[in-house]
Amino acid sequence: MQSDANKSQQATGRPVTTRKLDQLFLNLGDVAAFIGRFFQEVFVPPYEFKEIIRQCYEVGYRSLLLISTTGFITGMVFTNQSRPSLSEFGATSWLPSLIAIAVVRALGPLVTALIAAGKVGSSIGAEIGSMNVTEQIDAMEVSGTNPFKFLVVSRVLATSFTIPLLTMYTVFVALIGAFLNVNVNEQTSFTSYIQEVFGAITYLDIFSSVIKSIVFGFTIGMVGCYKGYHSSKGTEGVGKAANSSVVTAMFLVFIEELLSLQIVSAIRGS
């Protein structure tokens, strides 16, 4: 009895692996065309300023409470986890510097991006996917509105603008949580804590975190819009669009974090 792969190969005359590679390259081509269309539309009037501002509010409002809680807990937990290792060398006074470096360079942007990918990315994918299923996008085209500019460009710009702001807020909240922990255990004053924090970070750390957050925001918005815009018909397609938006965005965020770490390390070592 022949397997399904052999039957499929006989039906098409091509190996299954070859067809999967063809489909992969076709998908990559669709993604590249989607991104290219974004950069074409973003500089062409009319500009949807009201929609961009509304989406910025939606992205920030939807994530603010969760990011506040997560950032505060991250600062306290990281401080608790780092203290025993530093205590073995009698270097607990280095805690503020260690926390500042870890939070500003990596934890702040990464935690913010992951929370936004789960909260905002899924929302964008589901919203645009449901509009695609109910043919609202086709109706916008018939009415003379550019749905790509109104739906995609506005949301991608909103995430690109808002995620860096949320990242700075996450860093602030995490440092406050870490300060409370340090103050209770080491009786470090707020003035000394702030001096050690800002003495440990550099302009390169701040600049790289901001640029990285912009890239994360662009990725989250673009993935959510692409998945929703190309969702299959039916309610099941909306669920798949929301789920794949989260998974894909988180995966790409980790890849971008790894690449940015290598680039910043090379710059710092040069």
Image: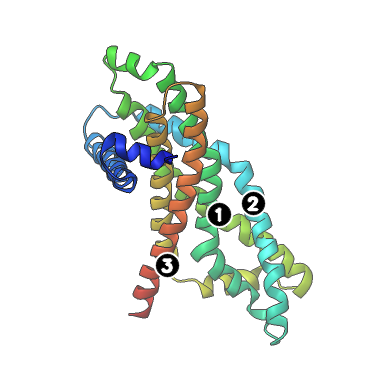
Between 82 and 35, which is closer to the camera in this rendering?
35
Q: How far apart are marks 1 and 2 (CA)?
A: 8 Å
Task: List the residue tagged with mark 1.
Answer: 111
User: How far, Cα to Cα, is label 2 from label 3?
Assistant: 23 Å
Locate residue 167, reporting x and y percent. Answer: 51, 53
Q: Mark 3 points at which residue?
A: 261
The image quadrant of residue 162 is top left
Callout 1 environment at 10 Å: few (<14), some (14 to 19), or many (20+)?
some
Between 32 and 209, the residue placed more toward the observer is 32
**Residue beneath label 2, please?**
70
The disc, 1 or 3, on the residue closer to the chain's N-terminal end is: 1
* Amino acid type, label 1: Val
Q: Which colour scheme is used?
A: rainbow
> In the drawing, does residue 146 fall left or right of residue 166?
left
Q: Percent position (x, y) of residue 224?
A: 43, 37
Q: For the residue labelled by badge 3, is the local secondary structure a helix, a strand or a loop?
A: helix
Q: In terms of image quadrants, where is residue 43?
A: top left
Residue 50 spot, x, y in % from top left = 39, 27
Q: Sequence-wise, which precedes: disc 2 or disc 3?
A: 2
Q: Say few, some or many: other residues with alpha carbon within 10 Å of mark 3 (under 14 / 14 to 19 / 20 or more).
A: some
Label 1: which secondary element: helix
Query: Which residue is located at x 47 percent, y 40 percent?
Result: 245
